[in-house]
Image (cartoon, coloured by chain):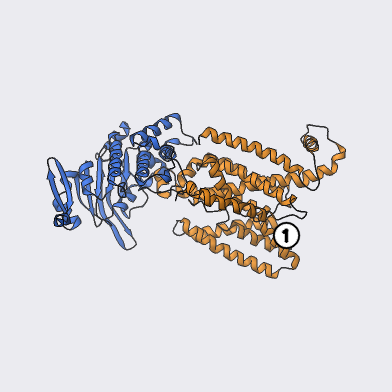
Chain colours: A orange, B blue
Amino acid sequence: MTFRRKITTLAVLSLLLFAFWAVSLRLGDYGISFGELWTLLAEKLGLGPGDSSLKVHGIILFQARLPRALLALSAGLSLSVAGALYQACFRNPLVEPYILGVSSGAAAGAALSIVFPHVFPQGQLSSFVFALLSVYVTYTLATMRGETPAVALVLSGIIIASVFSAFVGVMKYLAMDTQLREITFWMMGGLYYASFFDVALNLGAGLPVLLLMSLQGWKLNILTLGDNEARSLGIDPKRFRLAAVAAATLLAAFCVSSCGIIAWVGLMVPHAARLFFGPDHRALIPGAALLGGFYLLVCDTMARTLTAAEIPLGIVTSVTGAPYLIWLLRSRGRIIYGG
Amino acid sequence: MADDLSAAASGAGGFLLEARDVEFSYGAKKVLKGVSLGVPPGKLMGLLGPNGSGKTTLFKCCLAFQRPEKGDVLLNGRSVRSLSPKELAVKIAYVPQEHRPAFPYTVREMVAMGRTPHMGMRPTLTRRDGEIVDRSLELAGISSLADENYNHLSGGQRQLTLVARALAQETSLVFLDEPTSSLDFRNQMRVWGAVRELVKKGSGAVICCHDPNHILWFCDEAAVLKDGRLLAKGPSRQVVTTEILDELYGGEARKFEHGDKIFIYPRSAEDKD
C-alpha cells in the first residue's frame, strides 16, 4: 500500500470515527437529538445562545456521556498504541500491554484501596502506583549484568503477575460482600466513573506518545529485526527499547487505573491495524490509535445501551474481539505472518 | 565514498579495519586466542574455518556486538566499541543469514532500512534515498520482487534482499555471515554475483564461508581461522593450499587444477567409482 493511500485511509477512518462519536452521544436511556446536541455544544464553546429548557440534557451530556465517550477514545488509543509498541519491542505479534504486569499490579492497588479505603483513599492513584511498581519489579528482576533479554522480561512478567494475583486473592478473601463485588467489577473494566480528569490524564500521556512514536516509527521497524541488525543499521536497541517500553507502560498504567482491566484491545487492535496499514510503524501507530479509539467507543456504547443494566466493558471487548481474532488466525494468519 | 576510502587507508596502515590481538571467551571456553587481521579497502576477503573456529565471534567483535576481552578492533584508528551505533553504521554494513522477521515487511521496505544511518531525524526517505534503494534492488537482481512480502520469498531471494540492503547502506565495508550456506547452487551464484557488485562499487567486504571453492573462485583475499587462531592470510590462491586444507579438514579435501581454475573436492568422492 502506498503512503498516500495509507494517509487517505487514516483520514476516512477519522471522519467515520467523528460521525460515530456524534451518534454515540445521542444514544442512551435519555435521548438527545442532533439539534439539541449542537445547541449544547455550541453554548459550551461560546458559539451559540443556548437553551434553558435543555438543562437536564446538558447535565447528562457534559457530566456523563461526553467524558465517557472521550475516555473510551483515549483509553482505546492508549491500549492500542501501547500494544503496538510492546509488540515491536518484543518482536512478537502476540504480546499485549499487560504482559509486564501492569494489569495485575493495578488490580492489586485497586483491591487494596477498595478493601482498606481509610488507608488508601485514592483508588486510582494506588492502582497507578502499583501498576508502575509491578513493571519496575519485573524489569529489575529480568536485568542481569546490564542486559535485559526479552525472554527473561516476559518470564519475570508472568511471575510478578502471579504474585500480584495472589495478593488480589488475599484481598478478595478479606473483603466484605459489597467490596468483593466492587473488586470483581473493577477487574472486568468499565468507564462508568469517567470524568474529564481521567480524559485529561489519558490524552495528556497518550497524544504526546502517539506523536513521538509515530515520528520514530522507522526506528521501531528497525528494532523488530533484532538487536544485532538494529545496531548494524545505526540504532541503539537497548536505549530505544527502554524508552518505548517505558512510554507504553505509562500509557497502559494511566488507562488501567482509570478504566480497570479492559481485555483484548491492546492485543487485537494492532493486528487489525496491520491489516489496514501494513507493518510500517509510521502508519501503524497512528492507525492503531484511531482503530483502538473507534473500537472502544463502539464497545462502550454497546455496553451502556444494549441492556437496561450496564454490561462490563471487558466482557463486551472479549465477546466481540475473540471471534475477530479467530477469523484473523484462520483466514489471514498465514498471509500476514508467513507460515 | 572515495574520500572515505583514502582516509581510512591512510588511517591504519592501509587497512579499513584492523583487529589487533583480539581474545574472547564464552565462560571458560576461549574462542579467540589473539587474532590480528587487517581488512584492505575495495577487496573481497573470505574467512574460512571449520565450525567452532571462532569466525562468528570474530565478526561480532568487529561489528561491536561483543567487546573483546583483550586487544581491540580499530576503524580509522578508533576502537569500534567507542563509536556510536550510528557512526559505525555509516562505515560498516552487516549482512546476516536470511531469516524471517516477526512482521511482514515488503522487499522494498527491507532494503530501504539500509538507508537508516543516513536518515538522521527525518522520519521519511528522500527522493535520493528512493533512487538508491531502486538501484540496489536492481544490482541485486530483485527489482521485480520489490513489492512482495519478504517473509514469503524463498531463502535465496531473502538473502539477496539482505545483500541489497547492504548495497543501499553505502558503506566502505560490509560483513557477510555465511550468506550462501542454505541456498541451492544457482542462488549461491546469484548471491556471490550481488556480493561482487558490492566490491565493484568500491566497498571492502569480509565474508564467512564454508566452501573453499567459493573462496578460490570469488574472493581476492583469504584468511583462515582454526581453534581461535589465524592460520594464514593473503591472496586467496596462496592461502588455500593443500597443507592448509589438510590442517583444516584432516586430509579430506583434495585439490585439482584445470587450466587456470582450481577445484577442491572430497577424497571420499575418489572411492565412489
Q: Which residue, as the protein is rendered here, is positioned at the far right?
A: A53
Q: Viewed as shown, does residue B175 lie left or right of A148?
A: left
Residue tagged 1 = A121
- Which residue is painted at 75% across and 46% down in the image? A65
In the foreground, A211 or A24: A24
Q: Position of residue B199 (x, y in %)?
A: 28, 37
Q: How many marks?
A: 1
Instruction: Determine the image quadrant of residue A56.
Output: top right
Above or below B117: residue A162: below
* Residue B17 x/y as whole percent: 29, 43
Q: Quadrant of residue B52?
A: bottom left
Amino acid on which the number 1 mark rests in the picture: Pro
Q: Secondary structure at mark 1?
A: loop
Which one is in front, A290 or A110?
A290
Q: Position of residue A186 (x, y in %)?
A: 69, 58
Can residue A338 be seen here? yes
Quadrant of the image containing the N terminus of chain B: top left
Find residue A273 and report its horizontal and vertical position in percent: 56, 44
Question: Residue sitting at 56 percent across and 34 percent down?
Answer: A7
In this rendering, does residue B84 appear at all?
Answer: no
Residue drawn 40% across the image and 34% down it: B133
In the drawing, does residue B38 fall left or right of residue A137? left
Q: Quadrant of the C terminus of chain B?
A: bottom left
- The relative height of residue B44 versus residue A189 in the rendered view (above or below) is above
Chain on which label 1 sits: A
How packed mark 1 is, by other alpha carbons closer than 10 Å (few <14, some 14-19, many 20 or more), is few
